[in-house]
Image: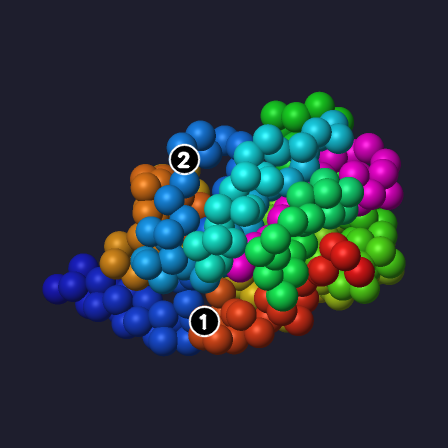
Amino acid sequence: MQFSVVRILLVLQALLLSAQAGNSVVNLSHYDLMRVDFAAMKREGVVGVIHEATYPRFDRDSYYGQRQNAAMRAGLLWGAYHFGDATDPIRQAEHFLSVVSSNWRGPGMQPSGVLLVLDFEKNGHYPGGTMSAAQAARFVERIKQRTGKYPGVYGSENRLRAVLSDSKASAADKRVLGNCWLWIANYHYEPHASSPWNHWRMWQYTGDGKCDLRPRSAYPKSVANIRNAERNIFRGSDAALAAFWEENSWQPSE
């Protein structure tokens, strides 16, 4: 009986969240080796794709450009992220914008532009070390200076809380990062916002096949032809997501 009550409560929580949010964003990188079926994504309710563009040290994702064009032909919104490291954050920001801009030329570019994100994770598999809060603040300031838009900041709930509650993170740097919109990862339960943010805009609830949330119909781990996808819930309807994307994205021609 106790198990049944818990299960019912989890189902009701999932239904409440789904009524207020859309499971409509997928993120990709060069680690996803398949030929992605973006048309199938669109049919399954995906609205936007955020793809890795650059990573340490000053490398570019070889899949980025071709997938951008294929996704946009399928009618999907497009975003780009940079995986940060502990090298010069200004140079990282310039490299990121250069790669995004160079791939934006050509026919069929969407009016809403590119949604930009800093991937602010612990760096355990690339050279260059792990980006600090101070370096992240300098990176997002540079993006704002160059584009007029603050990027999103992505990270796991536990890491963001640990890094930004540490005494090494200054109040000034936290204020700068607080200007960005929050994209948070938690594969176990709905996350809480981490200071300096009041709430998350996007929540990555699954990646690499990891997801403890139920029911599976509300929290699928696959999409189109990707079995272990990285899927995200946006806080709001699909219409609100499209408006958010347009408001916060960058037109590289500007």
When asked about the image quadrant of residue 9, the answer is bottom left
Question: Which of 13/244 is in front?
Answer: 244
**SS class, disc 2:** loop
Tell me where residue 208 appears, x and y as whole percent. Answer: 41, 37
Q: Residue at x 45, y 71 (%)?
A: 238
Question: Which of 78/234 is in front?
Answer: 78
Q: Residue at x 87, y 58 (%)?
A: 145
Residue stretch in magenta: 77-96
When asked about the image quadrant of residue 182, the answer is bottom right
Amino acid type, mark 2: Arg
- Asked if residue 68 can be seen in this view, the reply is yes
Please tell me which of labels 1 and 2 falls first in the chain. 2
Tell me where residue 147 appears, x and y as whole percent. Answer: 80, 59
Amino acid type, mark 1: Asp
When asked about the image quadrant of residue 78, the answer is bottom right
- Asked if residue 27 can be seen in this view, the reply is no
- According to the picture, the residue beneath numbered tag 2 turns out to be 35
Using residue 41 as the reference point, say whether residue 77 is left or right of it.
right
- According to the picture, the residue beneath numbered tag 1 turns out to be 238
**Quarter of the picture holding the N terminus:** bottom left
**SS class, disc 1:** helix
Question: Which of 244/203 is in front?
Answer: 244
The label nearer to you, 1 versus 2, is 2
